[in-house]
Amino acid sequence: MAQTVVITGASAGIARAVARLYGQRGDRVGLIARGQAGLDGAAADVARAGGTTCAVSADVADFDQVDSAAKQIEDALGPIDVWINVAFTSVFAPFAEVTPDEFRRVTEVSYLGFVHGTMAALTRMRPRDHGTIVQVGSALSERSIPLQSAYCGAKHAINGFTSSLRCELLHEGSQVKVTVVQMPAVNTPQFSWVRSRLPDKPQPVPPIYQPEVAARGVVYAADHPGRREYWVGASTAATLVANKMAPALLDRYLARTGYKSQQADQPDEPGRPDNLLRPVDDPAGSDHGAHGSFDGSAHAHSAQLWISHHPAATALIACGTAAAGAVAALAGRRS
């Protein structure tokens, strides 16, 4: 049965790939982002895939704009079943070089944008006692790295806010569900337009995954919102587990490696446009799509994602492997 799905930050990256997947399912997809060229491109992707769309230009840092966009989407597509918060921005720089206005702007988009989207969704979902909200997070929501203090702070805040909200919904006995999907490094255009004061071009910390891998994780989480959190990618799982076991060791490791691993081996372009305050696809009208510039090194599949989405099959395989090992060991002892 077709659903009405709303996606923020839909003009590029993970959100763009998520929109395309919902289009392939024949869903009604509401798209929210600032840049018109990217929105137009996302709407065309969904339509080509077989879905219907309503694209609305809005800045998620402004609640009134988000709420207005939600109203327009419901008027066009019907009651919202799924709301997916993805929109974010960042500044790559040591904390001492980030201005108060820059830190505020990252927080308003990357944290309050999720709060505003959740508010707009709940206003419509709670009276119907139906709906799912997906927060697209990051491994950096629990394991911070240098040079992204504002972004890491925002992602940590999303975890805390969402946990509080989940408790309230459980207290109410609400059928509205909320879940979080923690992401690895993903090949998105963000690294070509992020504001940066680093000498070399910013890059995601390897290993890097294609946005379609992340999108499959998001759609699965929306379909199975009973779990409070999902992880995408083996690097996310390894990072979060290691951080629980030895956070101080990771502090020292990242202090040594975190600067170099976030920079490519070529100088950044001085004065290039960034998307902190305004979209980079306007007024030039350039659509950047879902992928960034790291196609040559990005993984199109994740074994960890498959395992997390097929627990029964994984358990059977594990039992079969254990049984075969036991038989082999017994045969060895008899011989």
Image: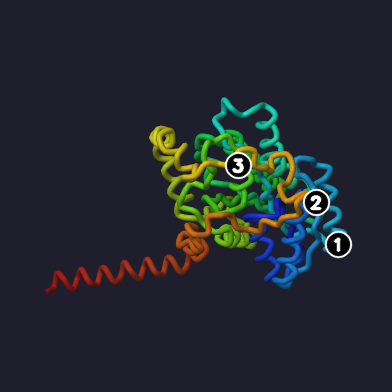
SS assignment at label 3: helix
- How many labels were placed on the picture? 3
Task: Where is residue 228? Give x, y as percent.
Answer: 59, 51
Residue 93 in sight here? yes
- Amino acid on which disc 3 is placed: Asn
Task: Where is residue 237? Give x, y as percent.
Answer: 46, 50
Instruction: Work out whether mark 2 precedes mark 3 in sequence or the reverse, and give the earlier one.
Output: 2
Q: Which mark is residue 76?
A: 1
Q: Dot 2, crowdedness within 10 Å: few (<14), some or many (≥20)?
A: many
- Amino acid on which disc 1 is placed: Ala
Instruction: Work out whether mark 2 precedes mark 1 in sequence or the reverse, and give the earlier one.
Output: 2
SS assignment at label 1: helix
- Quarter of the picture holding the C terminus: bottom left
Q: Residue at x 74, y 42 (%)?
A: 278
Task: Where is residue 177? Give x, y as percent.
Answer: 68, 53
- Quarter of the picture holding the N terminus: bottom right
198 versus 208 height, above or below:
above
- Amino acid on which disc 2 is placed: Ser
SS assignment at label 2: strand
Instruction: Work out whether mark 3 precedes mark 1 in sequence or the reverse, and give the earlier one.
Output: 1
Quadrant of residue 79 within the rendered picture? bottom right
Q: Which mark is residue 159?
A: 3
Q: Which mark is residue 57?
A: 2
Q: In the image, is 247 to the left or to the right of 169?
A: left
State if disc 3 and disc 2 touch (CB < 8 Å): no
Q: Dot 3, crowdedness within 10 Å: few (<14), some or many (≥20)?
A: many
**Camera-side mark, 2 or 3:** 2
Q: Report, in whole angstroms, how far the alpha carbon at label 2 lies from the one at label 1.
A: 15 Å
Q: Residue at x 83, y 51 (%)?
A: 69
